Amino acid sequence: MRAGLIGALLIAVAAIIGVYLGNDIIAAAPTGESARVADGERAQDAVSADGARDYLTPAELDTATRDGILPAGTKSLLKTDGKMRHGEYKWHDDGVPPGKLTIWVDLRTQLISVFRGGHEIGASVIVYGAETMQSPVGRFPILSKHRDYHSRAYDAPMPYSMFITNSGVALHGSPMSSRRATHGCIGLPVQFARLVFEAAKTGDEVRIVRSETKAIAANSQSAGS
């Protein structure tokens, strides 16, 4: 059991969804162990408690959204166990009712989470833009979707592309490795990209952030005092 709800949530910044990245990481991105928040009373909403989810208390959600760890309105997170490496993903939408789809990408933790109506239904490790061609940060609607897109600029397949900028930045299926980087796009395991592609529609929001470690560390110290 963890010492406090705020401290426990902030431990989870190393992986929004409780994923362990292990040693297979992009060298430029700091990593650390992460854990699901499992303490406290959960408001379980209309989604059945099938053992696949952790539910957030209002205090946990307030802390997580204030520090940029999770999007506002988050209700539950998928449980993950073991290590998740590049190429691995989790998808579980059983019992999750229709609702607004939000895609949350954290460049620092190299993770993507897909939420429907506040419930996380998918999570994966990503690859993203190299230093010379960085992935953008901000809020972006999905502008267009192309199942079998092929990049003429780079002569490369980009299956299940979901474009979020007019300059060509997209979420798409990609070979996955700790040594890979993109030209600014968010690269996903191909089968995970297919699931996101099928769940998302044009206009759905993609939020790309880079979580801050200094603020998190300060809050962790305060929580433990």
Image (cartoon, rainbow, N blue to C red):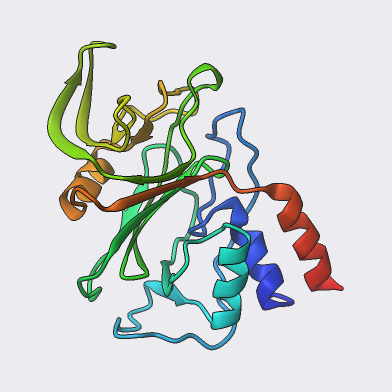
- Determine the image quadrant of residue 225: bottom right
- Where residue 147 appears, as percent x and y from the top left, is 13, 35
The answer to whether residue 34 of the structure is visible from this angle is: no
Q: Residue furthest right?
A: 225
Q: Residue at x 78, y 72 (%)?
A: 223
Q: Residue furthest front?
A: 166
The answer to whether residue 49 of the structure is visible from this angle is: yes
- Where residue 109 appears, as percent x and y from the top left, is 55, 44
Q: Residue at x 48, y 59 (%)?
A: 17
Position of residue 214 in the picture relative to residue 155 (left or right): right
- Depth order, front residue of 194/206: 206
Position of residue 101 in the picture relative to residue 16 (left or right): left
- Determine the image quadrant of residue 50: bottom left
- Depth order, front residue of 93/145: 145
- Disc tally is 0
- Where residue 136 appears, as percent x and y from the top left, is 46, 34
Quadrant location of the N terminus in the rendered image: bottom right
- In the picture shown, does residue 25 fall above or below 83? above
Q: Residue at x 63, y 42 (%)?
A: 31
- Where residue 42 appears, as percent x and y from the top left, is 48, 85
- In the picture shown, does residue 24 fall above or below 59? above
- In the picture shown, does residue 3 fall above or below 103? below
Q: Residue at x 42, y 75 (%)?
A: 75
- Determine the image quadrant of residue 127: top left
